[in-house]
Structures are given as C-alpha cells and as structure tokens.
Image (cartoon, rainbow, N blue to C red):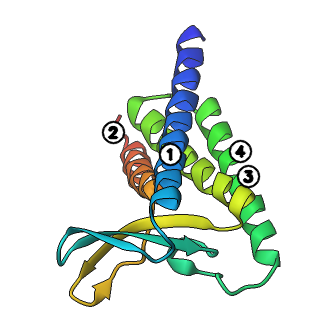
Amino acid sequence: MAGDRAKIVAFLAIAASVAAADQYTKELIRTSLEMFETVPVIPGFFNITHLSNKGAAFGILADAGRWRELFFQVVSVAAMAGLTIYFSTARRKDALLLTSTSLILGGALGNFIDRIHLGHVTDFLDIYAGRYHWPAFNLADSAITVGGILLAIRIFRESDGQH
C-alpha cells in the first residue's frame, strides 16, 4: 500500500513537471517571438516557429466553431481523469505504466491550460524537409506521443503475458 502511494505521488509529480516544462517553453515562445516568427535551428530540417492551434492534433476541428473549445475542454478533463483512474487502480504499477501515463497526463494538462487561458494551444516545434512541413507541435504533444507509444508497448507486453 505504501509503495502504491509513493508511485501515485511519483505519477502526479512527473505529470506536473511535464505540464510545467510545457507551460514554461510556451511562455518563452509567446514572449520571445511574434506570431509566425521563425528561428532556424537546423537548416533544412528544424525551426522554432510561433504558431497558434485552435484545433486538435494537426489542426483537426480548428474551424469547427464555438463548440470546439468546450468539446476540447471536456475531452481533456475526461482523458486526464481516465488516466489517473487507470493508473491508480492498476494492479501492477510498473515503471513503464508510471512513465507512460505520467507523460500523457502531463501533456494533456499542459495543452488544457493553454485552451483554458488562451482559447488555443501554442505550437512552436517545426520539423520539415524541403517545403514539406510536419504540423507544428509543442512539448505537451511530444509527451503525449511518447507516452502513448510507451503505453501501447506496455499493453502489448501485458497481453502477451510479458512483464
């Protein structure tokens, strides 16, 4: 029981750290760069570009109207609650479960804060090849993606009987 409590504290601490780092980097971008301003980091591959995203990943639903904000807020709260319940009720709270769910929760919280305070998410990581750009993203999106991959690995291992 005490071990589970320590893991729940670690889960929340990692998630809070991810959200704090995400908010710090976004604030740095908002105060350092004008909207659409670009700073080349690795020419031909990677820029820092200040952008705003009212939609979800890849701008999905960006033009959906006023209901979009409430929809994303409700989905974010439900996802964060679901992750917290999933982790706290998991029979085996291993490092992979702790890491994956913490990253997802922290990323969701970081983007949720933007949506509540700004009505959009600040994106700034711009990866491209030639004129082909991957949709811009941020630290929260990265944490969600890495966390999702790690969680999928854990689920597949668990379904195969591996621990």
Q: Amino acid at mark 1?
A: Tyr
Query: How far apart in space, not on screen, are marks 1 and 4 (Cα)?
Result: 23 Å
Q: Which residue is mark 2?
A: 162
Quarter of the figure with the N terminus: top right
Q: Indicate which disc, 3 or 1, sits on the residue closer to the N terminus.
A: 1
Q: Amino acid at mark 3?
A: Val
User: Which label lies toward us, 2 or 3?
Assistant: 3
**CB within 8 Å, label 3 to label 4:** yes
Q: Is residue 107 above or below residue 72?
A: above
Where residue 72 appears, x then y in whole percent? 71, 66
Q: Residues within 10 Å of mark 3 (few under 14, many from 20)?
A: some
Where residue 142 appears, x then y in whole percent? 41, 57
Q: Which residue is mark 3?
A: 77
Query: How far apart in space, not on screen, are marks 1 and 2 (Cα)?
Result: 38 Å
Q: Which residue is mark 1?
A: 24
User: Which label lies toward us, 1 or 4?
Assistant: 1
Outermost residue toward the bottom in this view: 131
**CB within 8 Å, label 1 to label 2:** no
Where residue 117 appears, x then y in whole percent? 72, 56
